[in-house]
Amino acid sequence: MSTADELLQQYQGQIVPRSFNAGFVTLSYIVSLIGAAATLELMNRRTSRNGYFNHFLLVSSSITMGGIAIWCMHYIGNRAIELADGQLELQIAYSAGFTALSFSSP
């Protein structure tokens, strides 16, 4: 195994080789489908433009579309990226706190 400095020098001025984990790509697609299906189901349950329950369904559908179908799909999809032939020192890492915070920001 190489240290991070050795890997950075090895790839300096070059494109770092990348590959994609097919399992994470597939999981990302499935999560997106589930989020979109949940959004459509919630929107179909709305009966009129008035009422607190209908507003709750509208807010819930926006959370499932934005939070599950889009946000979760992208983070799972980004997890599929493997850099430098899987060298642990050059992999993309996310802070759990900032990731959770990004879910709630517009």
Image: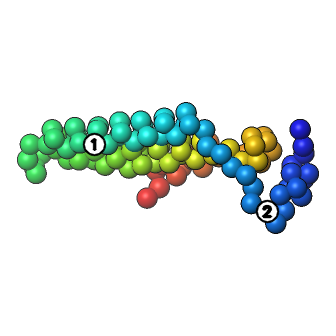
| Nearest the eye: 46 or 22 | 22
Q: Is residue 100 left or right of residue 8?
A: left
The residue labelled by disc 1 is 39
Q: Is residue 73 above or below residue 14?
A: above
Identify which residue is drawn at 15% across, 38% down. 45
What amino acid is found at the position of numbered circle 1 in the picture?
A: Thr
In the rendered image, which quarter is residue 39 located in? top left
The image position of residue 64, as x and y in percent, is: 34, 43
Identify which residue is drawn at 36% across, 39% down. 33
Quadrant containing the C terminus in the rendered view: bottom left
Tell me the CA gap for discs 1 and 2.
Answer: 43 Å
* Circle 1 SS class: helix
Q: Is residue 29 left or right of residue 102?
A: left
The image position of residue 70, as x and y in percent, is: 42, 49
The residue labelled by disc 2 is 14
| Nearest the eye: 44 or 78 | 78
Mark 2: give few (<14), some (14-19) or many (20+) Cα within 10 Å: few
Colour convention of the picture: rainbow
**Viewer-side label of 1, 2:** 2
| Nearest the eye: 6 or 85 | 85
The answer to whether residue 57 is seen in the rendering is no
Identify which residue is drawn at 42% across, 37% down. 31
The image position of residue 50, as x and y in percent, is: 10, 49
* Circle 2 SS class: loop
**What count of labels does the image hold?**
2
Mark 1: give few (<14), some (14-19) or many (20+) Cα within 10 Å: many
What amino acid is found at the position of numbered circle 2 in the picture?
A: Gln
Q: Earlier in the sequence, mark 1 or mark 2?
A: 2
Q: Is residue 96 left or right of residue 72?
A: right
Quadrant containing the N terminus in the rendered view: top right
Q: Is residue 73 left or right of residue 46?
A: right
